[in-house]
Amino acid sequence: MSINTKYLKNNTQDIITASEILKSGGIVAIPTETVYGLAADMYNTQAVDKIFRAKNRPNDNPLIVHICDINQVYNLTDDFCVQAQELVKKYWPGPLTIILNKKKSVPNNITGNLDSVAIRFPAHKTAQKIIKHTGVPLVAPSANSSGKPSPTSFEHVLHDLDHKIDAILDGGTCDIGLESTVISFLEKTPRLLRPGFITQENIQSIIPEIIIDNSVYSKLDNNQKVISPGTKYKHYAPKSPVILINSSTENYVNFINQKYNQDQNILAMCFDEDLKYIKNNIKYISYGPENNFETQSRNLFKILRDTENIDISEIYVHINNNINNNFCDLKTAVYNRLVRAAGFNIINLI
């Protein structure tokens, strides 16, 4: 069924309008510092079900609850442990999600029927105001079609969800561009489930001992339970197949130039440093300097979406993966998104 989606501006009146839509059981795309989220009242099960339908999202993929006051955590869990409290004292509001045992009052349809709940306090002032005016925490997964690159602008949301949701609030381009770091406190030793802007080094400055979950680097089995978004299903994928090329600049450029001789409809998604070596007639797009991971993270989803406007058969992405599987930095976060966009399809030329 087609919906007459409202387009809202980032002003006081439209923030109130967005909140009123949410109070009445609607779903609204809102900006955050990470990516745009598709928000609903966490306690309104029918509204939450609308999110799953609009996104075509598997219902065992849990949603993150967004709060605007740290005291709201106590309405969601009885196990707000000291380690979690110390971590959020440093990094909330911000791009950090914590997973704790949930209270029975937390609806099962937002947790994938698990006994845990994922919680975040976004730093984006507009998101905070919308949550405050709505009067309850909001669930807000990325405001995109499930499996597609996450949205970092109003235009991205409009492309995927226009006429499928009640409103989109235009908050400009997201500052960070990658989803939040996710860390679980369900075990004695905290477990990092999804890397992001808050890095392992940041976390260990507060909590020295943590575990890096295998899902950061590896594909989960189909029968494994998901306790964090972005860890099981194929994510972030544009229309054309993505293949990662793990190599030096020289090997990558040689590969691309040879591949072009076989298929002139390929796209090189590369680093700035590669551009001067790629044949002039090869289609290319850069996602940033090789060692500037903040720029890469900010550009990544936009670039993946931009590839959909180019007539191509395959996308060959240059990575230089000398990543230590025991350490998660911002480079790891970028790699984590790319390897899922590629469905773990990697060619190693190192």
Image (cartoon, rainbow, N blue to C red):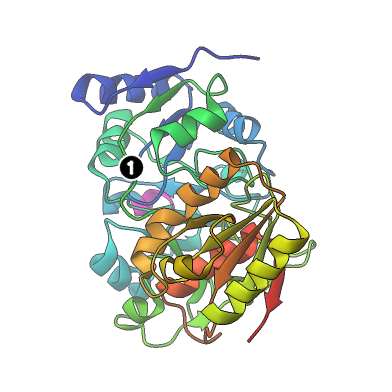
**Residue 178 appearing in the image:** no
Residue position marked by numbered label 1 in the rendering = 173
**Residue 158 appearing in the image:** yes
Q: Is residue 16 above or below residue 301?
A: above
**Quadrant assignment for the C terminus:** bottom right
Q: Which residues are magenta?
A: 73-77
**Quadrant assignment for the N terminus:** top right
At a point 38% along the width and 40% down the height, the residue shown is 137
| Crowdedness near tag 1: few (<14), some (14–19) or many (≥20) residues, C-alpha within 10 Å | many
Q: Quadrant of residue 7?
A: top left
Element under disc 1 = loop
Where is residue 256 shown, x and y percent of the image? 64, 67
At a point 21% along the width and 25% down the height, the residue shown is 11
Where is residue 241 shown, x and y percent of the image? 71, 53
82 on left or right of 266: left
Q: Main secondary structure of the magenta part?
A: helix
224 on left or right of 121: right
Residue 125: say if magenta.
no
Q: Nearer the viewer, residue 258 or 54?
A: 258
Looking at the image, the residue that sits furthest to the front is: 280
